[in-house]
Image (tube, grey):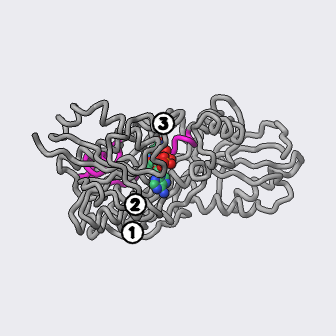
């Protein structure tokens, strides 16, 4: 029988224990597909005595997990700890530098250090794989690296954070406000005790920067992602958006053109006819547009022990087969540094929600600011429903350069007619 692929596992939490369960459950099938057995030989975490719901006594325990590769003699180390720096990064560097394969689900680390790690992997000609880092169980990295590899990708976008999508679609279903749904999501375990990485868009920005790099062959630019989360979306936004024919979703968009790379994670209005409008609950979805293949849509579970373990073990099967290639679909030496495109030049429609005083002249003031900024209005709703903070006005602009909409809001800022911060959301018109 062919030699087994020996695996050392760092991290035995949700995903780590899921990987052990999956390999146990599908052992024979995996062996037939990989052409050799995949065997976990060693594990490491913080607390050796913790009950993980799986038997770990059959594996070697390594206290200092940064030494996993050497201590266990494994061929590949799987990192399922998390954190962009610290022990995860030390383990990645040490494993790759030792000429061993490295598999991770850690989007934060890949978003910040992916290119530097890929350089080490290129130099040692070893695998660096991270399918589970973006959209959990959805094979979107494989789709871009392999299936769509012949295409020039012009745009990649999607719903990349299940917690935000769960919150927004629950607000939509129940008509409740953000803070109430977030508290419920935390109680149910759908949101972390500290949910800021998710709800402020940082987690989605990590994933988007990785997708952009793969799609456009450019080096990672996480700091170049214009990031805003969903904290300021109110129930009225979701209600008014629905009246206007849209759903509210947190969408990451990356585009590459002659002006550079554009990357943004913002809450957006998605037309009800668009596939992303139908992505509900904690699901994720990614769309990629290629010049020969057209529009590709990937959808599925973006998190959870089973789906994430599925992606991790798929990477291990590639390593076992010896089919792994370069981390970002090309050597680091072939990647470009595209610079950042000016978002103000993008043309599209926008949604603006204003809370205003209920008195004569306010509408004229808004109309004047829009006219002076070169923004014309396509739809307008004022329900006459007074909230504590005034009357809510929701409007959708015609197509115009984004800088014009920003200019209109700047003209209104500081006006005594406004009773709260305006909310601006762009419309996904592609
Ligand atoms: N959960 C998901 O659905 C999901 C989806 C996609 C990607 N990911 C990514 O997968 C990774 C793991 O996520 P998870 O949800 O499985 O996390 P988790 O449940 O919190 O598990 C983390 C594991 O890492 C261990 N650990 C933490 N700090 C350590 C340290 N300093 N030294 C040694 N071990 C340490 C913990 O040990 P103890 O158990 O002993 O405390 C635990 O076993 C993260 O990068 C995450 O972003 C997760």
**How far from the left and from the top, in percent, is residue 288?**
37, 47
Q: How much space separates mark 2 and mark 1, taking CA atoms?
A: 8 Å
Answer above or below: position of 139 versus 326. Answer: above
What's drawn in magenta, residue-wise? 139-165
Residue 430 appears in view:
no
- For the residues labelled 2 and 1, say whether their Cβ atoms are less than 8 Å apart: yes
Quadrant position of residue 122? bottom left
Answer with left or right where residue 35 lies relative to residue 9.
left
User: Tags 3 and 2 in contact by the CB under 8 Å rule?
Assistant: no
- As measured in the structure, the alpha-carbon distance from the residue carrying label 3 to the one carrying label 1 is 31 Å
Give yes or no for residue 157 being in the magenta stretch.
Answer: yes
Q: Which residue is drawn at 77% across and 61% down?
A: 413
State the image coordinates of residue 14 (x, y, percent, origin top left): 46, 41
Residue 175 appears at what percent x and percent y?
A: 69, 31
Q: Name the residue under label 3.
A: 283
Task: Answer few, some or many: residues within 10 Å of disc 3's Cα (few below 14, many 20 plus, some between 14 and 19).
Answer: many
User: Quick one: SS at disc 3?
Assistant: strand
Could one spot residue 43 in this view of the protein? yes
Instruction: Identify residue for label 2.
Output: 256
Mark 1, residues whose alpha carbon is within 10 Å: few (<14), some, or many (≥20)?
Answer: some
Rendering coords of residue 403 (x, y %):
60, 63
Question: Is tag 2's residue or tag 1's residue first in the polypeptide sequence?
Answer: 2
- Which residue does the numbered mark 1 point to in the structure image? 338
Labels 3 and 1 touching (C-beta < 8 A): no
Image quadrant containing the N terminus: top left
């Amino acid at each position: 029988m062919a030699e087994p692929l020996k695996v050392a596992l760092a991290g035995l939490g949700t995903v780590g224990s899921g990987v052990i369960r999956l390999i146990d459950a599908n052992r024979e099938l995996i062996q037939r597909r990989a052409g050799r057995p995949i065997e976990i030989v060693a594990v490491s975490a913080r607390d050796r005595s913790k009950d993980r719901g799986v038997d770990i006594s059959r594996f070697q325990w390594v206290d200092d997990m940064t030494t996993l590769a050497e201590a266990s003699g494994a061929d590949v180390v799987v990192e399922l700890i998390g954190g962009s720096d610290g022990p995860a990064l030390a383990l990645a560097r040490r494993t790759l530098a030792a000429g061993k394969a490295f598999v991770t689900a850690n989007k934060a680390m890949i978003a910040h250090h992916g290119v530097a790690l890929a350089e080490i992997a290129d130099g040692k000609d070893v695998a660096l794989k991270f399918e589970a880092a973006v959209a959990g169980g959805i094979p979107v990295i494989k789709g871009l690296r392999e299936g769509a590899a012949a295409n020039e990708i012009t745009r990649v976008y999607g719903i990349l954070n299940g917690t935000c999508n769960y919150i927004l679609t629950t607000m939509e279903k129940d008509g409740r406000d953000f803070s109430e749904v977030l508290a419920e999501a935390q109680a149910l375990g759908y949101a972390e005790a500290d949910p800021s990485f998710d709800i402020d868009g940082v987690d989605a920005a990590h994933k988007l920067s990785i997708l952009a790099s793969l799609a456009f062959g450019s080096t990672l630019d996480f700091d170049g992602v214009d990031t805003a989360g969903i904290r300021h979306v109110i129930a009225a936004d979701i209600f008014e958006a629905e009246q206007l024919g849209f759903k509210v979703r947190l969408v990451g968009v990356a585009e590459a053109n002659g002006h550079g790379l554009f990357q943004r994670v913002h809450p957006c209005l998605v037309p009800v006819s668009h596939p992303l409008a139908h992505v509900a609950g904690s699901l994720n979805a990614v769309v990629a547009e290629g010049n020969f293949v057209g529009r590709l849509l990937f959808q599925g579970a973006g998190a959870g022990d089973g789906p994430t373990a599925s992606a991790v073990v798929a990477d291990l099967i590639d390593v076992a087969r010896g089919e792994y290639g370069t981390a970002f679909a090309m050597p680091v030496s072939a990647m470009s540094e595209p610079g950042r495109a000016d978002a103000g030049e993008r043309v599209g429609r926008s949604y603006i929600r204003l809370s205003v005083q209920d008195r004569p002249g306010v509408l004229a003031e808004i109309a004047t600011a829009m006219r002076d900024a070169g923004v014309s209005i396509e739809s307008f709703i004022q329900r006459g429903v007074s909230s504590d903070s005034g009357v809510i006005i929701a409007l959708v602009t015609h197509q115009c350069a984004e800088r014009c909409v920003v200019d209109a809001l700047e003209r209104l800022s500081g006006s005594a007619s406004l009773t709260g911060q305006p909310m601006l959301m762009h419309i996904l018109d592609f």
